Image: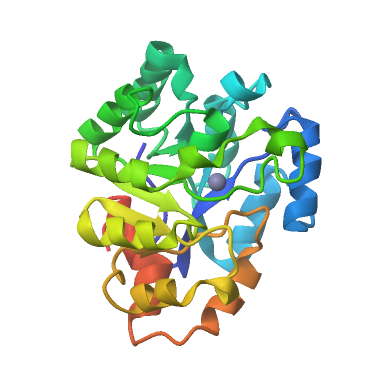
Amino acid sequence: MGISIDLTKVRGIDMHVHCEVDDHGHTALPQSFLDASAAYFKAGVRTPSVAQIGERYRQLNLAAVIFTVDAEHKLGHRRITNEDVVASAAEFPDVFIPFASIDPHRRDEGVAELRELVGSGRVHGLKLHPSLQEFAPNDGTAFGLYEVLAEHRLPAIFHTGQTGIGAGMPGGGGIKLRYSDPMLLDDVCADFPDLTVIMAHPSVPWQDQAISIATHKPNAYIDLSGWSPKYFPPQLVRAINGLLRKKVLFATDNPVIDPERWMADFDQLELKDGVRELVMKENAARVLGLEA
Ligand SMILES: [Zn+2]
């Protein structure tokens, strides 16, 4: 199955949307983590169904990359399956581009699942969350997953920087921020030159590192999710307008950030001619291997 998004019709591709609940009502995160993160993000509906997200994106004329986060090893909480995400997303083929999520601690069994999902064309990339999944991206735990993606020329989205998950909980819910230091991804970019690495979010407190990596490594990109463009640091806005205009991607982190709000705030940024189109759609089309 290829991607059936009509690029001439959609006005943007949101590279970062979470499936937080499956169609059986099972959530990606334990309830305590969901409650804490809802307070942190002041999100309205924290766990909309995939169908609700699909309807909304269809109305807004947007496509979206959608995935869950499999963090069973760290959280001890049963994951939403990739099968469920793929099945729910399939109801909106004009909207959704499903990515897999595999806990790297599943090792060979996880690699086999990814190989199967990718080989059958049901997913078009992988989402990883080093802090929530508790692994260092350069320590080997996930190398088998990278190899499958590199072989198929599919991208990996890595959470980078601070996370709202665990925020305010005792010990931050036991979640360690250092795993989400983008410098660890510089190693991955160097050692897996055929792997497209998408560093998600303005990587607070490592924004300059992310900009350096995306400048130096042709296979490194930045997705702009998780923050309203209103709060983008000035060096990021400068990079979007200049050196990195072909390396940055429209992305929200829905359901914690609403796409309409993100786009309204993005409209307020002073950007050079053509940059908006690159960020909203053209760069994503290239990363996803879609015909422009
Ligand atoms: Zn995410």
| Residue 165 image offset from top left, x and y in percent | 66, 42
Q: Is residue 67 above or below residue 113?
A: below
Q: Is residue 81 above or below residue 158?
A: above
| Residue 210 image offset from top left, x and y in percent | 37, 57
Q: Name the residue at the top extreme.
A: 109
Res 47 seen here: no
Q: How many marks?
A: 0
Q: Is residue 23 above or below residue 12?
A: above
Left or right: 181 as drawn, with respect to 46 = left
Q: Residue at x 35, y 73 (%)?
A: 239
Res 62 seen here: yes
Left or right: 127 as drawn, with respect to 34 = left
Q: Residue at x 43, y 61 (%)?
A: 207
Left or right: 204 as drawn, with respect to 41 = left
Q: Nearer the viewer, residue 7 or 46?
A: 46
Q: Residue at x 37, y 78 (%)?
A: 238
Q: Nearer the viewer, residue 63 or 29?
A: 29
Q: Give the color scheme: rainbow, by chain, secondary structure or one colour.
A: rainbow
Left or right: 20 as drawn, with respect to 146 = right
